[in-house]
Image (cartoon, helix red, strand yellow):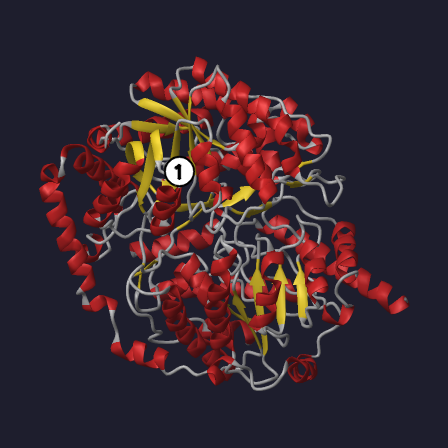
Amino acid sequence: MTAKSAAAAARATVYGYPRQGQNRELKKAIEGYWKGGVTADALRATAAEIRRGNWRQLAEAGVHEVPTGDFSYYDHVLDTTVMVGAIPERHRAAVDADALDGYFAMARGTQEVAPLEMTKWFDTNYHYLVPELGPDTVFTADSAKQVAELKEALTLGPTARPVLVGPVTYLLLAKPAPGAPADFEPLTLLDRLLPVYAEVLADLRAAGAEWVQLDEPALVQDRTPADLNAAERAYRDLGALTDRPQLLVASYFDRLGDALPVLAKAPVEGLALDFTEAAAANLDALAAVGGLPGKRLIAGVVNGRNVWINDLQKSLSTLGTLLGLAGRVDVAASCSLLHVPLDTAAERDVDPQVLRWLAFARQKTAEIVTLAKGLARGTGTITAELSANRADLASRAGSPLTRDPAVRARAEAVTDADTRRSQPYAERSAAQRAHLDLPLLPTTTIGSFPQTGELRTARADLRAGRIDTAGYEERIKAEIQEVISFQEKTGIDVLVHGEPERNDMVQYFAEQLTGYLATQHGWVQSYGTRYVRPPILAGDVFRPEPITVRWTSYAQSLSDRPVKGMLTGPVTMLAWSFVRDDQPLGATARQVALALRDEVHDLEAAGTSVIQVDEPALRETLPLRAADRAGYLAWATEAFRLTTSGVRPDTQIHTHMCYAEFGDIVQAIDDLDADVISLEAARSHMQVARELAAHGYPREAGPGVYDIHSPRVPSTDEAAELLRTGLEAIPAERLWVNPDCGLKTRAWPETRASLEHLVAAARTVRDELSRS
């Protein structure tokens, strides 16, 4: 196909779409089902209506090929586990008894059975359920979900393309199952898995699929020769099948690197590449392999992970270059639109000028359609769109909302001394022990306590004017009193105020810092039914006034025990926001760090002796390629130290991280120079404690003994056994006892019981240590 005919064939498509519905109907239906107020049939009906609504919106917008199979009740990797029959043995009876309840048991656990481990989907804030595989795993095909959703879409009329997690990525995301050898490599199961994919592909073809998309984002990471050989074998074998649809192998989040020539030579009909942040690298690599003659290329030129409008002219230039490199070029976002909110039209409180700069899923879809039209029919057919786009880009670039000279001058004046504590850890530790006088194995929590319906109602009533500020603050005071009283009665050593005034750990701070914008309906799935509204970083950042001092001080007035000041760290403030793309991330991080440094100073001045600066996103934001990591970790760890290094030696600085692979960043954790770190460890059976020990981590640590992402209540014996495992790696004088994460999403009954068991476990193990 010539470049001219490739342009004429250009079409618009997407890889995936937000799942929640316009008003988070899916979340409400699922949580209603869990509580027994919504039937399984009603839940399925709600899900089907959301899917149909998504397909209609896409088709009406001009998308030529809609995705199916991207919808999920909880997680698309868990859906893949079901599709290939890799059900953990401990969940098999539940799945056999009721597929839907068994599915949710794998995701959330039950009182009797632990859930699958959860971790971050590459460098996003989306969490997936980690497959558990072993030498004895037997795969069996179950294509029911994928076939049913394809048929649903085809009934409505549009061309539909099923989207599956690819076999190589699925195995690379997996971990050895309990009981499997620790050095077991799930990728060795590839030859056992491929026939299952072949069966699913045949079922989809029989159901009417012309194309099937196999997502292989793991191939944009640094891969070993064995990994690349596995990819070559996988797509050689799948490509050789006679009973299959046409295959599109999709990558996103970064450059393909060494995997690109492997996939380019594979007997598949198409590739999808990210041409946003990885544009230059993927373009060069594609040209180096001679392009994709006779094959389909889907060019991800619209950023699927951020909310700023596309530079249409720049994208058209990229697309024009690609026309000579493939038999057919189609247009898409760089990845699934799962990672952005649904529609800017729902936002009533954002400045109309700023709203012109933003594109959520529906607006990105329109951009994709416009680009496909311009590519296929010529730019003369999109003159009005190009003119409006240029005006909106110029409006943002020239806006005074984006620049504050005072903030920039302060950031430029930062010195290395500003990022270092005044004394080494050994001296600080001695001063803190004398000042705080804590017992061996001190107990604490991560920060938040349950966000009850009453609290959410109070916030809604305040926004709606049904109660005044004084009435709202009385409700907050009452909640803090209850939280402090409970912790004291339970015997927790270092208390928290429970954060009843906070809607979200990032949004709460963003709403009180300049440079940030908040949305009312910009919901994005984090995991399961947990949705967040990431704030939007549009301009330079500073803190006009103290944010947390009042409520922390009030809580401290209720107890003689230390109450932690609770802040969200600068990297997490970026990672869980939609960041500005008009300056380096490190520059933005320094601005946020200086704003938080002022808050740390004011907390300490108010008498707060323990200050926790959470950085759960430090690992999440780690670049996917090793070559890019040193630069990131340099500014990320500097930003944390800039936030925390201005305090006295006897002020104890904590940090917290959860649900990530920490082994990759142990040195960076060390470089933070925090006095205490708490980390997720319950689902991973204290793996992080062993990783810290192997590194020689010299400070105090609290690997979690209570998995807060499950409704199950750990027993005292279970928590004590995890503590004993932790003690095998971390000496007792440096070991803390705490949950994995904050308790915001849990209910009070399970929280009370779990924390009582946690404290009892700490006492049990203390007694054992005193007798040994």
Work out whether 582 lies above or below 143.
Answer: below
Q: Quadrant of residue 84?
A: top right
Of all residues, the one furthest to the top in this rendering is 206
Between 465 and 566, the one nearer to me in the picture: 566
Q: Quadrant of residue 426?
A: bottom right
Q: Is any part of residue 466 visible from this angle?
A: no
Q: Residue at x 53, y 81 (%)?
A: 420
Q: Residue at x 59, y 22 (%)?
A: 195
Work out whether 737 lies above or below 343.
Answer: below
Q: Is any part of residue 696 visible from this angle?
A: yes
- Judging from the image, what secondary structure is the residue with disc 1 in? loop
Question: Residue 19 placed where, x, y %?
Answer: 40, 36
Work out whether 34 lies above or below 97.
Answer: below
Q: Residue at x 50, y 19 (%)?
A: 241
Question: Residue 601 placed where, x, y %?
Answer: 47, 81
Total labels drawn: 1
Q: Is residue 390 left or right of residue 453?
A: left
Q: Amino acid at mark 1?
A: Gln
Q: State the quadrant of the N terminus.
A: top left
Between 347 and 573, the one nearer to me in the picture: 573
Q: Find disc 1 in the rendering and name its residue.
A: 20
Mark 1: give few (<14), some (14-19) or many (20+) Cα within 10 Å. Answer: many
Q: Is residue 552 left or right of residue 538?
A: right
Question: Residue 540 placed where, x, y %?
Answer: 30, 69
Question: Residue 556 placed where, x, y %?
Answer: 55, 75
